[in-house]
Image (cartoon, helix red, strand yellow):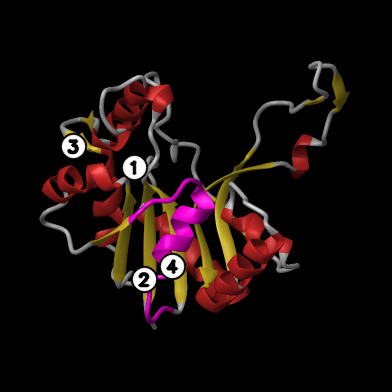
């Protein structure tokens, strides 16, 4: 069985207010992207890793990831297009693993558990129960609904799918002219079931400057450098 991981790292990271890709920022002396790639590289069930980046960032990423066996693909104008660009380069794949490069604290257990569920069900994603009460508001910010928190999950990555199912879902979305920001929604749009694997709250996404010290604190609490 051949399993391919797509690591998305082509975002511009404007909310980080940095002069370079947020994936090249360091957390305890290791860049965000290297922490992410290292975790996936250490998993025996993952055969290939594709890093999706902006064309201008390729030389920098190649330098940072020189000791890892990865290939590179140019990102698109949206998440869906970036994944599509990577998928088009894949010749042989059974399970497709999609992960945000900006989630460097994902654990090997979360990845393997989600892969196991995806092999069983065809599609699975890691997520955590929502802690806060969620409100639905209208365009004027007036509350119009309060969903039952017990049924709400905050979806993270990895999101893992049988390759042929994902390709079919991607083609359908393109035919319909739809552009989804979440890969699970592609499968949902096709009427496929997607299952959730409960993960860890520590699997944060590095998005704003405040996330860096938070990540450092998480690593320190794990006893990791």
Which of the pair 54/187 is nearer the observer? 54
Of helix, strand and loop, which one carries label 3? strand
SS at mark 4 in the image: helix
Of 184 and 125, the residue lying toward us = 184
Decide which of tag 2 and tag 3 comes sooner along the chain.
3
Judging by the rendered image, the residue that carries numbered circle 1 is 104
Q: Position of residue 122 (x, y in %)?
A: 60, 73
Q: Which residue in the protein does label 3 denote?
A: 30
In the foreground, 218 or 81: 81
Q: Is residue 81 magenta?
A: yes
For marks 2 and 3, give the one nearer the viewer: 2
**How far, Cα to Cα, is label 2 from label 3?**
29 Å
Crowding at label 1, few (<14), some or many (≥20) Cα neighbours within 10 Å?
many
SS at circle 1:
loop
* Label 2 close to label 4 by CB (< 8 Å): yes
Q: Which residues are magenta?
A: 74-93
Q: Position of residue 215 (x, y in %)?
A: 34, 29
């Amino acid at each position: 069985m051949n399993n391919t991981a797509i690591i998305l790292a082509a975002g511009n990271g404007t909310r980080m207010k940095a002069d370079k890709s947020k994936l090249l920022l360091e957390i305890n002396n290791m860049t965000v992207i290297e922490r992410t790639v290292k975790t996936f590289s250490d998993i025996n069930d993952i055969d290939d890793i594709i890093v999706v980046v902006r064309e201008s960032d390729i030389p920098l990423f190649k330098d940072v990831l020189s000791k890892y066996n990865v290939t590179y693909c140019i990102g698109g104008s949206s998440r869906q297009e970036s994944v599509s660009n990577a998928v088009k380069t894949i010749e042989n794949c059974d399970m497709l693993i999609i992960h945000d490069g900006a989630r460097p604290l994902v654990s090997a257990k979360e990845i393997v558990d989600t892969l196991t569920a995806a092999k069983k069900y065809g599609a699975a994603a890691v997520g955590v129960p929502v802690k806060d009460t969620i409100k639905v508001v209208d365009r004027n910010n007036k509350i119009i609904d309060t969903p039952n928190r017990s049924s709400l999950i905050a979806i993270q990555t990895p999101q893992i799918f049988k390759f042929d199912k994902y390709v079919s879902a991607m083609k359908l979305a393109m035919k319909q002219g739809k552009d989804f920001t979440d890969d699970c929604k592609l499968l949902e749009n096709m009427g496929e079931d997607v299952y959730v694997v409960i993960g860890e709250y520590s699997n944060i996404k590095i998005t704003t400057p405040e996330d860096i010290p938070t990540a450092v604190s998480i690593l320190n609490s794990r006893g990791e450098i």
